[in-house]
Structures are given as C-alpha cells and as structure tokens.
Amino acid sequence: MNRISCWLPAVVLLLGCGSAGDGEPEATGSLSLALETNGVTLNTVTYTITGADFSRTSVVDVTKSTRISALIGGLPEGHFEVALSATDANDPTINCSGSGAFDIVPRRTSRASVNLYCRQDATTGSVAINGSVVRCPTIDSLSAEPSETTVGDTIALSVEAEDPDSLYRYLWTISDGTLADADTPHPELTCTSPGTVRLTLVVQGGGGLCSDTAEATVYCTPPDSDPQSQDDPSTPGDDRIGYLVCGAESCLPGSTCCAGDIGCAASPEACLAAGAPDYLGYRTCDGPEDCAPTEACAVSRHWVSCGPATFYGVLCHKDSDCVSTPDNPNPCQPNGYCDGPFE
C-alpha cells in the first residue's frame, strides 16, 4: 500500500467586493488548494465541495504542476467539506482519496487540512474450503469356490472389502453365464456354456466418488460325457478346458506356462519371480476350449493368449482346429500350429 499523508493548506480568500451601486459587501469567498504530491504521479484530481444546500464537483488538471492546486471561488458563507479523489497516472491500481472540513467566513481567510491516502487495489483473495472425508473401498480378496465346474452347476463368489459402514455398492459383471445377486458381496454364477468366464467386480464408495476393481477367471467345463472333458494324448496340448500343457506337466486352470524350463506359475509376474525371461514365450492357453466363445487361442510375437484371431498365427491341438479343404489339407502340426485360422 502506498500512502501519502499530505497536509493541504486550503486557503479561503474573499475575492468578492461590493457590488456597484448597492454598497453592500458580497457574502462569498474562495478556497485555495495547495497539496504536495509526495512522489505519486497525478494528472487529474477530482474535488467535491458539499455544505448546506450546496454541492460542487469539478476536475483539476495538475499535469504540469508539482502540487495539487486550485482557486475555487463563489463559495457561500457556511461550513463545508471537501473530498478529493485521484488515480496514479503510472499505476491505475493505486487510487487516492481524502477529505477535510473548512468554514467560509466572508472577508476572512480560512485554512483546511486534508490527508490524501493512496492505496493499491487488492490483488489477492481467500477461499473457504468445505468438504467431507470419504472412505474409499479397498478390495482385500476375491474368491470363487470352486473355480471350475460343469455346465449347469454354480460357482459361489465372494469378496472381502474394508466396509465399516456397509455403504459400498457391489457391481459384478461376467463374460458368460448367469449371475444371481449381482449387487451383493456374495453372488452366485451359473455356468451355461463351456469355456472361460471372466469376472469383474467394482466396489463403489463415497456415493460413487471412488471405487476399487478386481478381476478373476473361472472355468465352465462340459459334462463328463463330453469327450473333451478328458485329455486326448494323441493330440497336442491338453483338451480339457482351462488346462494347458507346459513341458512335461499340465497347468491347472488360471495358471500360466512360463518361458524357459520354469513350468507353471500363477501369473507372468510369478514366472518372472521364478527366474523366467521377461514376458517372452508365455502361454495361457493351448486351444480354443480355453478361451471365451468370441476369442481364439492366438499366437502373438511373444506369447500365446486368448484374444481376437488377428495375431501372427493360431495354435491348434487337433486337426479340426484348422481350416482344411479336400484340395488343401491343413492338419495340426506337431509343433501346435496350423496355417489357417480356427474353425
């Protein structure tokens, strides 16, 4: 804040004289302003003089002056206040104002004192922040018992989350099958067709403002009378849904066949922890029975997984997995590949 505390000698002069012919003195006076600017650059100053039944406002040009000065005449006898206002010519955010009182007495010289205060406009403000503490959910565990069952049977799902107030919302979705009580912590999945079923759970808290997500995979197998419920040793891979051959062993559903000689592990991350190469040569399927109905067990550049059959090739484990014609046989090769897509 720039502050100018200036003394204003406001001199009131009797400039009037007797009117010709009446011999009576004129009952008016004048106000003389002389105010040092004290470092503030002012081009104009507005003054307002007010009194009983009297008011006058005008602008004084002080561009070529070193002080605020004016001679204001024609003021009637009485008590008055003068208010000054101005703006710094070099900084329009600095505004000045001040006021003082004086009396006009005919044929007398009066003085008034005015302090002109210059202040810079405020450039900052404050904010009052209101809110509340929201307890966001954290999923501690997601369970499926059993994780594999036959078509027509059910899998019990459950979740444990930090839920001290029981205000969370549970949103389950599945890639196949039917789900009962999908808005509770304990729904039930019914297998309706063979294949892999992917589960996704979103737990919402804070009125939907925050959430936590978990995913899992379960397997629906054909009835025992289906030949594919048993592995056919004459074909590459493991014909059972969810199983895949990994070296000399078969990985259980949900497992990953690691690169190198590591064998089966729970995930690619677990393969890395066991010393496998970084995301090279992993397998999570060895045939279409391990994938959802809309997906294929496809070979990408670095690993084999379920997905759209738009990768570099596809994996087979029996001749019927390959597209063949009488003129162009396309058997499943011992290495598990065929030249064409799945049926």
Image (cartoon, rainbow, N blue to C red):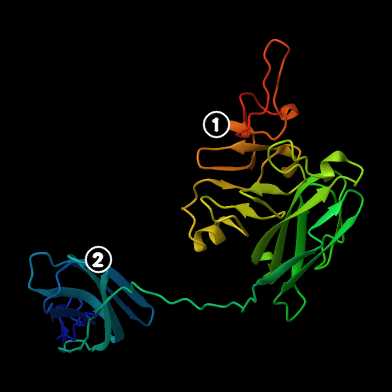
Q: Residues within 10 Å of mark 1 (few under 14, many from 20)?
A: few
- Are the residues flagged by discs 2 and 1 in contact, CB closer than 8 Å? no
Residue 46 visible within the image: no
* Residue 196 left/right relative to 120: right
User: Where residue 142 sits in the image (x, y, percent)?
Assistant: 72, 66
Q: Nearer the viewer, residue 94 or 139?
A: 139
User: Where residue 84 sits in the image (x, y, percent)?
Assistant: 26, 76
Q: Can you say which quadrant of the picture contains the C terminus? A: top right
Q: Residue at image x 71%, y 55%?
A: 252
Up the image or down, 147 lies above or below 237; here it is below
Residue 121 visible within the image: yes
| Camera-side mark, 2 or 1 | 1
Instruction: Identify the amino acid type marked 1.
Output: Tyr
* Residue 259 left/right relative to 231: left
Q: Residue at image x 51%, y 42%?
A: 302
* Residue 233 left/right relative to 105: right
Up the image or down, 340 lies above or below 283; here it is above
Q: Nearer the viewer, residue 54 or 215?
A: 215
Residue that mark 1 sits on: 312
Q: Nearer the viewer, residue 319 or 189?
A: 319
Q: Residue at image x 87%, y 51%?
A: 150
Q: Secondary structure at mark 2?
A: loop
User: Where residue 330 sits in the image (x, y, percent)?
Assistant: 67, 21
Residue that mark 2 sits on: 92
Q: Nearer the viewer, residue 134 or 100?
A: 134
Up the image or down, 314 lies above or below 176; here it is above
Q: Residue at image x 48%, y 60%?
A: 275
Instruction: Identify the amino acid type marked 2.
Output: Pro
Q: Residues within 10 Å of mark 2 (few under 14, many from 20)?
A: few
User: Where residue 59 sits in the image (x, y, percent)?
Assistant: 23, 66
Q: Quadrant of residue 26?
A: bottom left
